[in-house]
Amino acid sequence: MENHKIFSMAFGKVYSLYVQKAEKKHRTKAEVDQIICWLTGYSQKELETQINKKVDFETFFAQAPKLNPNVSKITGVICGWRVEQMEEGLMKKIRYMDKLIDELAKGKAMERILRS
């Protein structure tokens, strides 16, 4: 597996950027948290613990309770990559999260973002 710089980046650092992006578009931190918990299976408390422990992305996803079974419904382009065509692995999980936060910032309804 290729070792990308983001794998060793502190999740909490990028998390704060996700929140900023959402808030600039009049969305909330609670919605960002809901998306991340939906994707990873973390509870709110577990998510906060991971952020406070300053874990990197690799650890964050390795310790995630369970990736949501509906992730296969996440499609589209993010950062120039078509998510559904990416190889399974850590980068694909990170791109799933990027895609969901991007949809939030673009004003999509939570029901659609969470593939309900």
Image: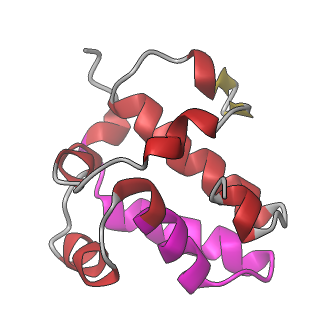
Front position in the image: 116 or 51:
116
Q: Residue at x 56, y 65 (%)?
A: 18
Number of numbered markers: 0
In the picture provided, is 50 more to the left or to the right than 24? left
104 vs 85: above or below: below
**Snapshot colouring:** secondary structure
* Secondary structure mostly seen in the magenta stretch: helix
Q: Which is nearer the eye, 65 or 116?
A: 116
Q: Is residue 88 above or below residue 100?
A: above
Which percent across, then down, holds residue 13?
38, 65
Residue at 42%, 49% (x, y): give it. Answer: 68
What are the residue bounds of the magenta stretch?
8-37
Which residue is pictured at 56% across the width and 83% down the height?
A: 29
**Residue closer to the observer: 91 or 38:** 38
Quadrant of image for the N terminus: top left
Residue 80 in which image quadrant: top right
Locate residue 55 relative to residue 11 in the image: left or right: left
Residue 27's x, y, as percent? 73, 80
Residue 111 placement (x, y as % from top left): 72, 66
Q: Residue at x 27, y 48 (%)?
A: 61
Q: Is residue 57 above or below residue 5?
A: below
Name the image quarter holding the C terminus.
bottom right
Q: Is residue 96 left or right of residue 106?
A: left
Please check the rendered image and state whether residue 79 is part of the magenta-colored stretch, yes or no: no
